[in-house]
Amino acid sequence: MTRRSSAAPGARADSRSAADLVGVRALALAAHRLDRCRSIDEVAHVATTTGIEVLDARHVAFCRIDQDTCRIVLVEPPPVAPRAVWMVRASYRADDRPALRALIRDRASWVAHARTVHDESTVPDDPDAGDPVEVDTLRELDAATALATPMVVNGSVWGQLYAVRARPGPPFRVDDVARAEVLAALVAGAVARVDLEAQVRHLVADDPLTGLANRRIADAEAEAALESGHETCIVMCDVDGLKRVNDELGHDTGDDLLRSVADVLGRAAAALPGSTAARIGGDEFCLVTVGRRRAEVADVMAATIAAFPLPHGAAISYGIASTAVTGSVSARHLFRQADTAQYKAKRARARALRSMVPAAADPAVTAERVLVAGTAAIVAAQSGVVPRLCAFAAAATETLGGSAWAVLTRRSASEPPSAVARGGSPAEIGVESSTAVVIHDLWQVEIGMSATAATGEVVATSLDALAAVAILGAR
């Protein structure tokens, strides 16, 4: 009995020493692996796999905390039980989790136990069991014990590492918390470095106004696409109406318009995986695609531009150049070809608008077309008088072959009107045009018309009726 009792503590001490040594080695290896990480996803993978080893855990979660809400980024190994899968996908508010609130406020780790060292259920309200909410969570997972430790980045709690042990398993103790905090510190350092590198890349590679790639990245992506040997397409885009918006509504509104264009290009790029959307400069944008057929690129561009029209009557003209047509060429040549196609498309669009004007000899047909186009535009417009009047004015101007339209209002009948919105594009030099003015209450709508468009009482009546529908229907 004496020999057995004297030997047992030594054996346990040797076992602890061996476990500590394994933990130190694992942490040292994690430090080297984290130094090679270049993304948050890579950091999360190293953190969770290392946590499983050094904490002898069944699962380890890498969590992001933002505005007092915790969201699980990665769990290793991924859970399979339906309840656990649902809990991994959920987000958790600090207002509902006292332990999470304390972790954020005090930057302190916590432990909770649903089972004792003998795998017996902990007694309700047992202070040694930890926060009751976390204990209940462990019971839902049928787990034994949990541990969470904060990841502090630049003086703030950026996230947490959360670990659980399955049944039967010993509760997490002080030594486990210490190892978890060392791992969390290593991970936080990697997060700070990766985040700083991402910010630097953003400053170097991204257009500051729109968030799209800049010209340097577009050129590099085009070169890489050409070197791949796959079909490469360049889409050059130009914003029709930006100068008018800047002159009439201000440069802040013009900047908003450019951001709207960037949103359209970003959506097109998302629909063509592997593509890069970029702002070349001013009102010039481009899309670089690789491994996509020209017909597919054209379909996506047409559908995206139609689904997301620009505000203030602006529009996107674009041209596409593809190596399937040009053959093996330089990136500069492909950009030039796309730019030429864009210019031709811009001119063709202007001619198409003029060709849509109905014959001047048939005012009834003109009035019918104005009513159909205007009604559809008003129904599809956002709520409010101004959006509905803008939609009506744009549709009527396009139907009548005009170039520009405007919506004006006055505070009282005795005051001159002031513009609240304008759209379309200036008429080309040498092209005759006229303007139809529709006044309803304090609102005034100016509609551009081609010199060859039909006029007369029936057309004027249709415009008056549409203006009334747009205004009265918004009330």
Image (cartoon, helix red, strand yellow):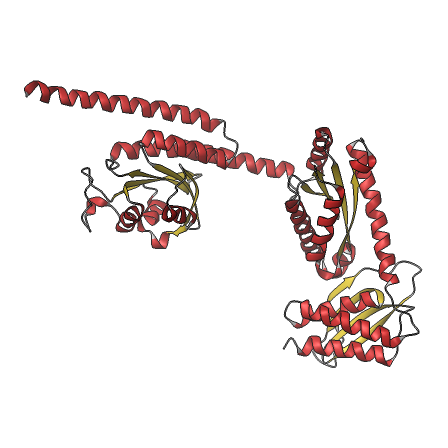
Residue 124, percent across and down? 19, 51
What residue sits 29% from the left and 38% below the top? 166
Tell me where residue 438 sits by quadrant: bottom right
Nearest the eye: 225 or 66: 225
The structure residue drawn at horizontal position 64% and vertical position 71%, both measured from the top left corner, is 384
State the image quarter where residue 161 is shown: top left
Viewer-closest of 54 and 368? 368
Location of the N terminus by quadrant is top left
- Residue 107 visible in the shown view: yes
> Who's the residue at 73% across and 30% down the image?
229
Image quadrant where one finds the C terminus? bottom right
| Residue found at the far front of this picture | 81
Residue nearest the viewer, comparing 369 with 163: 369
Camera sees residue 210:
no
In-image side of 405 versus 46 (left or right)? right
Residue 103 vs residue 264: left or right?
Answer: left
Residue 41 on image: x %, y %: 49, 36
Left or right position of 67 against 418:
left
Question: Outermost residue toward the top?
Answer: 3
248 and 323: which is toward the camera: 323
In the image, farthest residue toward the left: 1
Image x and y of residue 462, in percent: 79, 78
Q: Give the tally of numbered discs.
A: 0
Q: Quadrant of residue 378?
A: bottom right
Residue 34 point in image, percent of width and height: 46, 29
